[in-house]
């Protein structure tokens, strides 16, 4: 099968998301689609998958123009998609998730769950995916969940499989396994579209690489013709510095010290398991780990949003284990939360109001009863200028900002005061390259000013680039402490997966 | 680390709440129900009356409840916590009855029969709510659906015959389900607001038209309700037989609806998809399931079930429509959805708890208890309040309920 | 893009929301007319279609005359609007805090009962009695509002359910209270309270310029306007108002920012309950002079519609309350002049809310093209 996207154009109010984009992929090859956040990759794939109708242009299958009214049409045409955010119902079993939409039925429309199990088993055995049809999705690690997604696609007899940022949640070794799966798909005659922003992976697996920038295809190349720097430049439109420039750390006394910390989730499962570590002033400590290994809960406990079940947290010698978030804030702790839309901002309020969200109550802005919005406005204008937030009015709603600028609002709010400790969780998730560079430089600047910095990120590259020391978290425990200069990404990846690199004594 | 199993803050809170509730019930039992020395006669079958010494019973119960509560606070019953709470509450109600009725006898089985009969509109309303909420649409409009259906059912039933009355009631339930669907699904109006608007609209239209038409034409509002039919064999079982199987058709309808919905929801393709779109509609949508269409379908079927529930008033109980005859039963049904954990059988049990409270009140109205009747009147609402407060933390609502879905 | 362009855009947007409000009211009147005609079975049965339409015309003109057609009608409208404004602010404030206060009725009953008690046990000049009695109403309503707030904060029980149940409990509790020696009027056997003292009754608003006869509205409207002004200040200028709104829009972000969710939930319900309690007190001191089981009527429920219609803003809530008050007095006139009973008003209100909540629907019906209208979601799940 050959799939052609011809001159696809799709606009939303105020945004031209895809501008005459043309791509093609055939059976037995891997096309990598590379682009920054906001370059239009997702829109394009939603068009391909029947979720959006293009304004103009067409989709051709084996040369025949077709239109997709819905995802069902796309599936019927042999297109399968593995979404970045898994499309799995957490409270359903593997089999139930896989057969949803193509359920085998018995008498009176009743569900034939035995047949469903068998269907999952067959596909999973054929591609060596090793799945238990009866396991509940919510109990499975993300790597396995991704296999469920792949089985879903294969069961529907897809000829072209689209993977949207498939490696974002995987460990390096899981990524290698994933590439094996991709190879077996290609061997079975499937066409694969691999959407990513990770250049190394595209170079590793793709036959052809298409680069998308601001809604248009700016070039197509192959791994043999191009290298990382060249593709990065195509992607961003200017030369990009791929490493964070920083001097070596000058660590001082301990600022944050965590001992024997244990945290349970509401269902009583241990999510942070007896953790001890310290962060000293003037150093950046990074916590690496696959998503869902307790990092979120650890950060929430450190910042006072979640109660610790055992152990203690100390800030500069004071025990803050049971201190409120506000008290921690006043003691000089900053928190850049992992999800800016959910926690970091009230997007229905103005940029100025968001810039004081964590300190509106200070005497600077309030006498305890009423607010001095004039003062807030003035301070906000200053912050917006100093932290490069692109807006023409601080009284605009925060929802009017791009993701990168929203993140800069949070960075400005959290880092623009005297700090002892800065905790940053996924500080650059879903942010454009320019903003990433800027935010990284601000974090390094904060370290150099003598703040203790704790970075939590599931992007191993980010942790390695920023950190002076790395702690690896796996199933709620810290399984390793490594020096990023002396350890390879592959070895850290093995720790992230719960195993040990060869040559390390147990 | 201590030797006991560690509990999360939420678990500790639930556990503590349960313990405190048990102790409070025990203390109430000890303080009030032990005061009167007489024995109460619980009429079980025609020939047999169980005599309970209210004082002795309350003493034993008080000790047991406080003991259980203390144990819960000290160690915890773990998984058996809810069983103890439910049993404790039921025994508390019996103790209350024994105390109120001490020195007299009353027809206990008749009270249970009344309980089951009254549960019909709440059960059906709750099943309607489950059908909607499981598919991700919150239905606050159950009250309005019941009310409008009772109105239509009475008029159509009076003009034609009761069976057509049921058809009319079901049709009006479907119509309001459709209205909820168009506004909530197509126009993406806030689902709670739509629900409220529909409740207002039902109340307004039925009162307005009722005043304007039914007052001058009483023959449009008069029909003979269904009579009880004994189920052979089953109705011969002592206590349970008369309570559950000497009822009119509506009660049997509600059994069928509860059983059918349970099967539907958990054993069919339709149910799997419904639960999927209530939890994570995008996942279902990405597999080609038409989320919006399925939501419409659920709302319409839910409307039909609520319509059947509304028909209970004119066709299954009182034989006519009065202004605001549903009197908030739709809201109790809403609470039953939560208490019943979005499961039809759970909702049925929840409905029985509420109507038991009401049946007790009616029974006690005939006995001289010394409790102000106004407090008895509020008993069902009070029970609802306590139960929702006590149980809501333990149930898991469909994740996407209340959120509109767009195919993007 | 230049700034004046943005400003123009937002002004047009506001205009269009006003236009949509008007169109919603017109739509409701049209549907109401259809219901009036269709339910006129007598005339329709006799084929007197013209007569049915002429009654409709009489009814709608009575609706206008009864609400704004004379000084007395205007006075009636002011009196009817007063509790809608105050109770509307109660519901609106709760909405802004992310809470759905369906319990205004119960809170009005609790507040009104407290006001009544102070009103008949106290002696003294009006200047002392009235504020104290209203303060009692505030406290009564606040205490009753605290119950769903505490239940939500401690157990997660959703206020939609608890406030509905508490409305019923309040109405039976007041029935009981009115049966006690403390409250019951000595010469009566039905549940009705003693009269509050004459000094406690609210004076006529224009009595001081001798207009008390022609414009008999009581001065509760002044309290109502003060409540609106206070609500505006609270939202726009106060620190707590900022916290309430941040919490209402994004509870997770509010907690992240150090605000205490449980406290805001309780305080939000307490404040909303207190305001509703004042509405109850005003009805006692302004309109009745005594309490009955039903003195709050359906005001607490209608207040939800008022707040929705006014999009929970101070001015919007006030104007929609005035519209509802006008409908109320017009409806009474309509009931006097025609066969059409006042329950029509309930229908009209429901339709207005429905059309207002569905701006997209109104646009589709009237084929209005304009910028997007927000369809915010008040419901945030059943909680846990």
Image (cartoon, coloured by chain):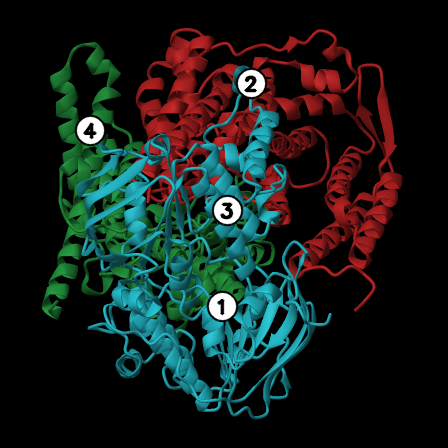
Instruction: List the residue tagged with mark 2.
Output: A106
Mark 3 or mark 1: whose residue is earlier in sequence: 3
Q: Chain of mark 2?
A: A
Among the chains pictured, the one given cyan colouring is A
The tint chain C carries is: green
Q: Are marks 3 and 2 on the same chain?
A: yes
Among the chains pictured, the one given red colouring is B
Q: Are marks 3 and 4 on the same chain?
A: no
In the rendered image, the quadrant that contains the N terminus of chain B is bottom right
A5 or C384, which lies in front?
A5
Mark 1 or mark 2: whose residue is earlier in sequence: 2
B313 relative to C146, above or below: above
Q: Nearer the viewer, mark 1 or mark 4?
A: 1
The image's mark for residue A460 is 1
Q: Left or right: where does residue A81 sit relative to residue C77?
A: right
Which residue extends farthest front? Answer: A224
- Kind of element beneath mark 3: helix
A199 or B246, which lies in front?
A199
Q: Left or right: where does residue C25 sit relative to residue B29?
A: left
- For the point 46% across and 9% down, the residue is B163
Real-space Cα separation, disc 3 to disc 2, in angstroms: 33 Å
- For the point 53% across and 57% down, the residue is C149
B283 relative to A33, above or below: above
Instruction: List the residue tagged with mark 4.
Output: C33
Instruction: List the residue tagged with mark 3.
Output: A181
Binning the other alpha carbons within 10 Å of mark 3 as few (below 14), some (14 to 19) or many (20 upward) gives some
């Amino acid at each position: 099968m050959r799939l052609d996207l011809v001159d696809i154009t799709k606009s939303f109010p105020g945004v031209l998301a895809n501008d005459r984009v043309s791509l093609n992929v055939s059976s037995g090859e891997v096309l990598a689609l590379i682009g920054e956040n906001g370059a239009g990759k997702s829109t394009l794939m939603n068009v391909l998958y029947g979720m959006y109708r293009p304004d103009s242009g067409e989709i051709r299958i084996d040369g025949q123009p077709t239109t997709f009214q819905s995802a069902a049409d796309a599936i019927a045409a042999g297109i399968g998609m593995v979404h970045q955010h898994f499309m799995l119902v957490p409270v359903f079993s593997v089999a139930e998730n896989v057969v949803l939409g193509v359920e085998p039925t018995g008498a009176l429309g009743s569900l034939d769950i035995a047949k469903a199990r068998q269907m999952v088993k067959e596909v999973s055995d054929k591609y060596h995916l090793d799945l238990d049809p009866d396991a509940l999705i919510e109990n499975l690690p993300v790597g396995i969940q991704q296999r469920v997604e792949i089985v879903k696609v294969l069961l529907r007899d897809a000829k072209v499989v689209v993977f949207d940022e498939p490696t974002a949640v995987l460990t390096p070794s899981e990524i290698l396994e994933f590439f094996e799966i991709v190879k077996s798909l290609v061997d079975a005659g499937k066409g694969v579209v691999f959407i990513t922003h990770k250049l190394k992976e595209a170079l590793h697996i793709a036959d052809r690489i298409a680069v998308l920038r601001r809604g248009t295809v700016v070039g197509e190349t192959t791994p043999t013709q191009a290298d990382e720097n060249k593709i990065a430049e195509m992607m961003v439109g200017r030369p990009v510095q791929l490493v964070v420039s920083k001097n070596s750390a000058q660590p001082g006394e301990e600022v944050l010290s965590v001992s024997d910390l244990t945290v349970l989730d509401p269902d009583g499962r241990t999510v942070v398991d007896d953790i001890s570590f310290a962060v000293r002033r003037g150093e950046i400590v990074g916590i690496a780990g696959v998503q869902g290994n307790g990092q979120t809960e650890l950060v929430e406990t450190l910042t006072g949003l979640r109660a610790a079940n055992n152990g203690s947290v100390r800030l500069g010698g004071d025990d803050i284990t049971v201190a409120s978030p506000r008290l921690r804030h006043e003691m000089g702790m900053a928190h850049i939360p992992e999800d800016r839309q959910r926690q970091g901002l009230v997007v229905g309020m103005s940029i100025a109001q968001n810039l004081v969200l964590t300190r509106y109550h200070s005497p600077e802005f309030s006498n305890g009863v009423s607010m001095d919005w004039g003062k807030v406005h003035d301070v906000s204008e200053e912050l917006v200028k100093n932290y490069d937030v692109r807006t023409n009015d601080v009284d605009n709603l925060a929802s009017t900002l791009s993701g990168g600028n929203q993140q800069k609002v949070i960075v400005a709010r959290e880092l623009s005061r005297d700090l002892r400790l800065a905790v940053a969780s996924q500080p650059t998730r879903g942010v454009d390259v320019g903003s990433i560079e800027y935010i990284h430089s601000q974090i390094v600047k904060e370290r150099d000013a003598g703040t203790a910095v704790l970075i939590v990120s599931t992007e191993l590259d980010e942790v390695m680039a920023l950190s002076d020391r790395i702690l690896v978290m796996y199933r709620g425990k810290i399984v390793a402490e490594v020096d990023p200069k002396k350890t390879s990404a592959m070895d850290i990846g093995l720790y992230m997966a719960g195993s040990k690199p060869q040559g390390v004594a147990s | 680390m201590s030797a006991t199993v560690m509990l999360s803050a939420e678990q500790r809170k639930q556990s503590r709440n349960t313990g405190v509730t048990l102790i409070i019930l025990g203390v109430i039992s000890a303080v009030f129900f032990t005061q009167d020395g007489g024995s109460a006669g619980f009429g079980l079958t025609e020939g047999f009356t169980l005599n309970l010494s209210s004082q002795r019973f309350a003493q034993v119960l008080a000790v047991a409840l406080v003991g259980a509560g203390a144990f819960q606070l000290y160690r915890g019953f773990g998984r058996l916590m809810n069983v103890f709470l439910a049993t404790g509450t039921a025994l508390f109600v019996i103790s209350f009855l024994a105390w109120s009725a001490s020195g007299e006898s009353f027809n206990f089985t008749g009270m249970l029969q009344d309980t089951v009969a009254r549960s019909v509109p709440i059960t059906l309303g709750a099943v309607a709510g489950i059908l909607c909420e499981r598919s991700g649409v919150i239905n606050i409009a159950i009250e309005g659906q019941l009310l409008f259906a009772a109105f239509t059912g009475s008029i159509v039933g009076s003009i034609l015959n009761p069976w057509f009355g049921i058809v009319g009631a079901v049709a009006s339930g479907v119509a309001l389900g459709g209205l909820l669907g168009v506004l909530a699904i197509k126009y993406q109006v806030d689902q709670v607001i739509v629900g409220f608007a529909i409740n207002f609209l039902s109340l307004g239209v039925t009162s307005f038209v009722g005043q304007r038409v039914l007052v001058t034409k009483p023959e449009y509002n008069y029909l003979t309700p269904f009579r009880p039919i004994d189920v052979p064999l089953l109705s011969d079982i002592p206590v349970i037989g008369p309570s559950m199987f000497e009822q009119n058709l509506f009660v049997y309808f509600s059994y069928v609806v509860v059983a059918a919905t349970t099967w539907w929801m958990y054993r069919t393709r339709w149910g799997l998809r419904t639960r999927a779109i209530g939890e994570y509609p995008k996942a279902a949508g990405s597999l080609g399931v038409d989320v919006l269409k399925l939501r419409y379908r659920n709302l319409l079927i839910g409307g039909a079930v609520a319509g059947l529930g509304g028909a209970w008033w004119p066709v299954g109980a009182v034989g006519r429509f009065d202004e605001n005859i549903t009197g908030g039963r739709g809201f109790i049904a809403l609470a039953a959805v939560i208490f019943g954990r979005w499961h039809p059988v759970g909702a049925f049990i929840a409905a029985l708890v509420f109507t038991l409270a009401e049946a007790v009140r009616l029974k006690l109205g005939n006995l001289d208890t010394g409790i102000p009747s106004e407090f008895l009147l509020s008993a069902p609402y009070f029970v609802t309040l306590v139960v929702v407060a006590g149980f809501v933390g333990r149930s898991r609502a469909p994740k996407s309920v209340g959120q509109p879905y767009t195919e993007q | 893009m230049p700034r004046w362009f943005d400003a123009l855009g937002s002004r047009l947007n506001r205009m269009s929301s006003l236009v949509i409000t008007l169109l919603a009211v017109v739509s409701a009147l049209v549907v109401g007319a259809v219901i009036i005609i269709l339910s006129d079975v007598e005339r329709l049965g006799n084929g007197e279609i013209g007569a049915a339409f002429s009654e409709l015309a009489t009814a709608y003109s009575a609706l206008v005359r009864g609400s704004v057609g004379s000084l007395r009608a205007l006075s009636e409208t002011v009196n009817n609007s007063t509790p809608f404004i105050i109770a509307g602010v109660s519901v609106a404030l709760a909405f802004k805090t992310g809470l759905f206060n369906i319990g205004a009725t119960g809170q009005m009953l609790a507040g009104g009962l407290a006001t009544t008690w102070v009103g008949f046990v106290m002696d003294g000049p009006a200047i002392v009695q009235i504020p104290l009695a209203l303060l009692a109403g505030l406290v009564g309503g606040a205490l009753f509002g605290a119950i769903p707030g505490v239940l939500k904060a401690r157990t997660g029980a959703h206020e939609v359910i608890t406030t509905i149940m508490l409305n019923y409990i309040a109405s039976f509790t007041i029935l009981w209270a009115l049966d006690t020696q403390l409250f019951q009027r000595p010469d009566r056997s039905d549940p009705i309270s003693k009269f509050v003292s004459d000094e406690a009754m609210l004076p006529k608003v224009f009595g001081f310029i001798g207009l008390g006869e022609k414009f008999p509205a009581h001065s509760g409207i002044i309290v109502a306007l003060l409540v609106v002004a206070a609500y505006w200040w609270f939202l726009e200028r106060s620190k707590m108002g900022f916290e309430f709104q941040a919490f209402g829009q994004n509870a997770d972000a509010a907690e992240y920012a150090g605000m205490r969710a449980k406290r805001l939930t309780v305080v939000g319900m307490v404040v909303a309950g207190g305001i509703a309690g004042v509405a109850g007190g005003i009805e006692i001191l302004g309109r009745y002079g005594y309490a009955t089981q039903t003195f709050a009527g359906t005001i607490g429920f209608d207040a939800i519609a008022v707040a929705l219609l006014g999009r929970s803003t101070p001015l919007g809530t006030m104007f929609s309350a005035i519209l509802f008050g006008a409908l109320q007095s017009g409806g009474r006139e309509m009931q006097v002049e025609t066969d059409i009973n006042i329950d029509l008003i309930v229908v009209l209100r429901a339709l207005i809310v429905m059309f207002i909540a569905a701006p997209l629907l109104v646009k589709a019906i009237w084929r209005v093209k304009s910028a997007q209208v927000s369809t915010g979601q008040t419901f945030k799940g059943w909680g846990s």
